Structures are given as structure tokens and as C-alpha cells.
Amino acid sequence: MALTASKKRKLVLIRLVFRVFGVIPLCDKYATMQVALSEIETFMCDYGAHHSLVIYPYMPLIIFDFDNCLAPGNSVGEDILLPLFDVIESDKSNDLTPSMRQEMRLDFWRKPLDYIVEKYKFSKHSKSASYAYFSQLSIAHPIEGYEDTHLVHAFEGVKILVTSGFQKFQHSKIRQLGVEGAFEDIYYDDPGNPPRKGKAFYFDIIAKKYNTAPSEVWVIGDSEESEISAGNSLGMKTVQILRPGVKKSPKAQFHVSSLQEFLSLVQMS
């Protein structure tokens, strides 16, 4: 016999209490759901009389990446970085070949600035100019995400956004994409605010804040070196979303091609 919505909610409550308080699993001892709920209610009242009781809802905790997960890295329009490219490429101290210049321009839409500065051995002048340029950068026009970006609003549970990049610029992109309201919290791993902490630092804070075991936290993004590596280091469930141009990484526990696939994965777990 199919469970009604009301009974499903009660079953979620039962499982929540089992998880939080270590009560034995649902078995023959609880012949009916009403008996189980009665025993749980008695237990919680007794516990609450002697402790400060705070319980978070039993719903998934999901950490999202932003660039190349919810919106293409170049969704702001590639012209926005042309003035900076002129400065870097005209700096003779950088010694960039034509092929290196082309690769560097692509990296600006896929990698954080500190990584780019180190990879291409920017001169002191180019490094300073790059940080100054990004620190003041923001956009005031709407940007387009992927066809399924709107599905971020369909996920139940606690949704957190952790993004690498300069906070002013990243926040303007998030706002102009129209997804800011989908998240409980937004964290910025900002290379312009040293020392750079890395995403694992923020992931750990999030798991502790929401009283969730790392093994129960979902992490979705495109980058093997960034969010996938950070999530793996903490024992979280890592999902690589294979947006156009993203190379599949064997380090991710799961792979999806869309948010719809990810939504189905979370719902089945």
C-alpha cells in the first residue's frame, strides 16, 4: 500500500531521530508507525527536559560551485577582459609565445587568477595590474546560465554556494544570473584576500555549521583541482558536472551531464 504524504513525513521524522540520537533502526519492535512516533515523542520530551535540543531538518546538504557549473565562465562576455589582456601581452617581461597567449586567455575563464599568475610567471607589474583589475571588476547586466540552471531552485534541502574568485566580481555574476536567493549561504574563496584558504576550509565550516557528517554532504562542480579535490579530502560525496569543454576526472565519485541528472541522483540516495 502506497504511503500518503503525511505518513512519508512521519517516516522522515522517525529516521531523523534514529540518525541524531542513535536509536536502533526501525524493525519489528515498532509494529506500527503510531507506536514509533509515540516512543519518539516520549524520548524527545524527556531529552529536551535536560538538554538544549536543536535538530536540523533531515534533508540533503548540497555545496554548489558557480563557474562552469551554474554558468559558463565566459558568460559575462569575453570583451570584459580585453583591457587586461592588452596590459599583460604588451609586458615584455612576461615572455609569452603566441600559443601561450592563446592558452592563457582560455585559462582566465576556467582557472583562478593566482593559478594563472604562477603558471605563466607573470612579471611583478602584470601580477599587480591583474589583481587591481579584478578587485574593481563587476557587471551590471544580466547573464545567461545553462539551459538547466533554473533547476537549482528545485533542489530540496540546504544549498550552499562556494565560489573561487574576487568577491565583488563573483557576487555581481551570481546576482545577475538570478540564483542568489536559491542559497542559504554563499562563500567566496577570494585570491584578493590573502591568505587564500581553499575550498576545503569552507566545506569543513559548512558541514560543522549544519551538523552534517562529511559523508552526507554533496559537492558538485566541474574542477578536479578545486571542489572535487576539496570534497574528496573531507570524505564528501563529489559529483563532477561535465559541462561543455570539461574533461572527465576519475577522482570524482559521480559524473553527471546536467543538473537534472544530479537532481535524480540526490533524490534516489
Image: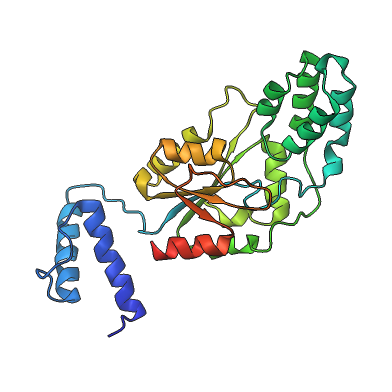
Residue at far left of view: 29
The quarter in which the N terminus is drawn is bottom left
Residue 41: percent from left, percent from top: 19, 65
- Left or right position of 80 against 204: right
For image coordinates 77% across by 14% down, the residue present is 124
Residue 31, quarter of the rendered image: bottom left
- Left or right position of 55 against 77: left
For image coordinates 90% across by 22% down, the residue present is 90
For image coordinates 48% across by 35% down, the residue present is 200
For image coordinates 73% across by 52% down, the residue present is 176
Look at the picture and state if 94 lies above or below 148: above
Residue 12: percent from left, percent from top: 31, 66
Residue 114, quarter of the rendered image: top right
Give the camera-side residue of 261 and 207.
Answer: 261
Q: Is residue 15 visible?
A: yes
- Left or right position of 147 against 255: right
Look at the picture and state if 145 lies above or below 34: above
